[in-house]
Image: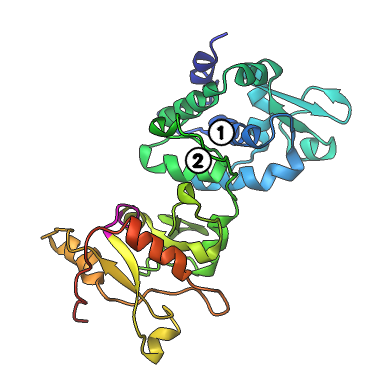
């Protein structure tokens, strides 16, 4: 059976280019949970909120329910549902799924195929991402779904496998009150934050923990520049007004970064020496050990001198 072909042909409602990524999102989430527990089943009432958040952030703008894909994905041969009464989905109604104790999991044949060929999981996931979402969303969507997709160049490395904590993003964004620690950006669509991400200071691949002391809430642009070594976090003696906000942490901008446009100056070079927008009172700021790791292992060259206010 060609599982990639079956994945590419998921039955979806469509009209005039309208997006309907309900089934792909459920399948990505199920693949992530399979990585954690290959024998586990997903009780609808226990995962409904997770699935609803995925739909709210990555689905269409109209209100929808995860009950729809939970029921209808069965018809594609990649998913199965059982209730307290036995095999089979009770329908696509939220109440039906809740009251019957409905649980879902990848189909038996697909689970067997993934056990025989572990690399198949990554190929299915990447196909779903490529078919239904722009590349700019792939990394954060994998994190939100709990998926671990190893880069091709690291396949031969022998490392101890750890499980990411899917709750880190929410904890970090809450700690920083949904504001970018570098520029203060705090955009939302309705109640859903857009363009805000939880950045690891010490990279997870190099032992960085999934906790707030190793995290920064950053906008998408500054997260990318932070991971590229254009931006960093330094330490300086804060004035009293700064101690409350950034706790003495200041933004580093690499001298190697070149940008002549007004946008590059405003969004990057002008940040040099500014205090961080720190976490809310009572929350510990970035730990010195993680900050120092990023400075020595990621940040490029020497920092620019502070820019005049």
Figure quadrant of the N terminus? top right
Closer to the chain start, of discs 1 and 2, is 1
> How far across and how far down the image is residue 34, in percent?
65, 32
Residue 26: x %, y % from top left: 60, 34
Question: What residue does disc 1 label?
Answer: 28
Residue 110 occupies quadrant: top right
Left or right of residue 77, residue 262 in this image: left
Q: Secondary structure at mark 2?
A: helix
> Does the segment drawn in magenta span residue 167?
no
Residue 93 appears left or right of 137: right
Rendered residue at 89%/27% (across/down): 85
Residue 239 point in image, percent of width and height: 36, 89
State the residue position of label 2: 142
Local secondary structure at mark 1: helix
Q: Residue furthest bottom?
A: 240
User: Which one is in front, 1 or 234?
Assistant: 234
Residue sitting at the far left: 260
Whether residue 107 is visible to the viewer of this picture, yes or no, is yes
Q: Position of residue 306 (x, y in %)?
A: 21, 77
Q: CA distance from mark 1 to mark 2?
A: 8 Å
Q: Which residues are magenta?
A: 225-230
**Residue 229 located within the stretch drawn in magenta:** yes
* Point 38% across, 32% down: residue: 153
Position above or below: 99 against 4: below
């Amino acid at each position: 059976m060609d599982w990639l072909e079956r994945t590419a042909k998921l039955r979806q409602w469509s009209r005039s280019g309208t997006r309907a990524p309900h089934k792909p999102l459920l399948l990505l989430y199920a693949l992530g949970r399979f990585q954690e527990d290959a024998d586990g089943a997903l009780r609808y009432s226990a995962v409904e909120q997770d699935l609803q958040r995925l739909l709210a952030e990555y689905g269409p703008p109209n209100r929808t329910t995860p009950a729809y894909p939970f029921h209808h994905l069965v018809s594609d041969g990649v998913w199965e549902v059982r209730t307290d009464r036995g095999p089979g989905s009770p329908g696509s109604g939220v109440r039906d799924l809740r009251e019957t104790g409905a649980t879902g999991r990848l189909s038996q044949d697909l689970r067997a195929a993934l056990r025989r060929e572990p690399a198949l999981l990554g190929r299915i996931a990447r196909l779903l991402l490529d078919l239904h979402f722009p590349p700019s969303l792939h990394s954060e969507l994998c994190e939100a779904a709990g998926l671990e997709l190893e880069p091709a160049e690291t396949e031969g490395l022998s490392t101890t496998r750890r499980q990411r904590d899917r709750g880190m993003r929410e904890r970090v964004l809450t700690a920083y009150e949904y504001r970018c620690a570098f520029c203060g950006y705090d955009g939302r669509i309705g109640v859903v934050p857009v363009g805000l991400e939880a950045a690891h200071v010490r990279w997870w691949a190099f032992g960085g923990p999934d906790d707030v002391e190793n995290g920064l809430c950053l906008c998408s642009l500054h997260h990318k520049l932070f991971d590229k070594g254009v931006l960093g976090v330094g330490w300086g003696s804060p004035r009293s007004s700064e101690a409350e906000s950034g706790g003495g942490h200041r933004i580093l901008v690499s001298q190697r970064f070149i940008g002549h446009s007004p946008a590059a100056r405003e969004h990057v070079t002008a940040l040099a020496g500014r205090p961080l927008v720190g976490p809310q009172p009572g929350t510990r700021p970035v730990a010195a050990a993680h900050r120092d790791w990023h400075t020595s292992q990621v940040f490029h060259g020497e920092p620019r001198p502070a820019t005049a206010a």
